[in-house]
């Protein structure tokens, strides 16, 4: 049986439902998930729970879809799950590790019975590629009627930083020749020209 281990600064393998069924390779994947996703959220927002991974928490039944390839669900305490989702869309997704970053609200059936708790569904890009070959990078919001709203969509699975930068100001200090300042500006412009574009949907 696999041994419990520390995945990141204060995330442990035993925090994932049915962790005892994980292989060593899956534990390594969980460590990367903790370092890239769960730990930053816990650091920013406090208590963060992994409520589902490769197995349903109830009965340790194997899950299908992207969960079978490493996707996980997160819940942030204090009713801050959606706030964390919005934060992560710009703070975590530019690395290109996450393929799907989906906010799923609490949902009820026609009798008023709760059928889904609020959570963030996180599918690493590698998990999506293994599941169905879809390498897009998207932040999505599931609406109460079951439809999906595309919050952010990175074109072609590229890695881009969605933050808008302040206008660049180049100044020349005393003693710097004007042609030196122009050379610096030309280098900055050339570097910026190779940047990637972000499409908002």
Image (spheres, rainbow, N blue to C red):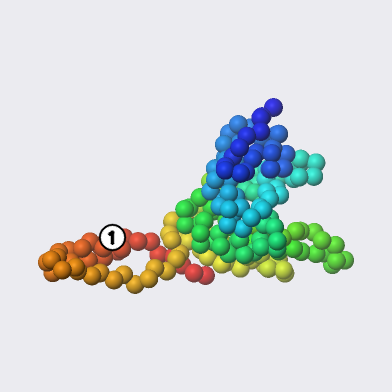
Q: In which quarter of the image is residue 195?
A: bottom left
Q: Residue at point 25% right, 69% down?
A: 170
| x, y percent for residue 9 | 57, 43
| Depicted 85 relative to depicted 51: above or below | below
| x, y percent for residue 52 | 70, 48
Q: Residue at point 69% right, 39% down?
A: 14
Which residue in the structure is indicated by mark 1? 191
Q: Residue at point 51% right, 50% down?
A: 97
| x, y percent for residue 105 | 71, 64
Q: In which quarter of the image is residue 26?
A: top right
Give the left or right position of residue 93, taking residue 171 as reference: right
| Depicted 32 relative to depicted 139: above or below | above
Q: Mark yes or no: residue 133 visible.
A: no
Give the left or right position of residue 106, taking residue 175 as reference: right
Give the left or right position of residue 168, taking residue 111 as reference: left
Q: Which residue lies furthest to the right in this view?
A: 111
Q: Residue at point 70% right, 63% down?
A: 79
Q: Mark yes or no: residue 42 visible.
A: yes
Give the left or right position of residue 175, taking residue 92 as reference: left
Q: In which quarter of the image is residue 191?
A: bottom left
Q: Which residue lies furthest to the top in this view?
A: 1
């Amino acid at each position: 049986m696999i041994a419990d281990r520390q995945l990141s600064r204060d995330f442990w393998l035993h925090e994932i439902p049915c962790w005892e069924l994980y292989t060593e390779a899956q534990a390594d994947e969980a460590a990367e998930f903790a370092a890239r996703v769960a730990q930053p959220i816990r650091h920013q927002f406090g208590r963060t729970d992994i409520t589902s991974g490769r197995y349903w928490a109830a009965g340790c039944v194997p899950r299908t879809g992207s969960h079978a390839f490493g996707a996980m669900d997160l819940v942030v305490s204090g009713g801050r799950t959606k706030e964390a989702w919005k934060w992560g869309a710009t703070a975590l997704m530019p690395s290109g590790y996450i393929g799907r970053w989906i906010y799923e609200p609490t949902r009820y059936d026609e009798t008023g019975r709760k059928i889904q708790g609020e959570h963030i569904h996180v599918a690493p890009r590698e998990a999506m590629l293994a599941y169905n070959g879809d390498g897009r990078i998207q932040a999505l919001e599931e609406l109460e009627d079951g439809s999906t709203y595309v919050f952010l969509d990175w074109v072609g699975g590229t890695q881009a930083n969605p933050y808008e930068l302040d206008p660049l100001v180049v100044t020349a200090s005393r003693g710097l020749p004007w042609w030196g300042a122009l050379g610096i500006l030309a280098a900055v412009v050339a570097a910026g020209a190779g940047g990637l574009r972000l499409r908002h949907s």
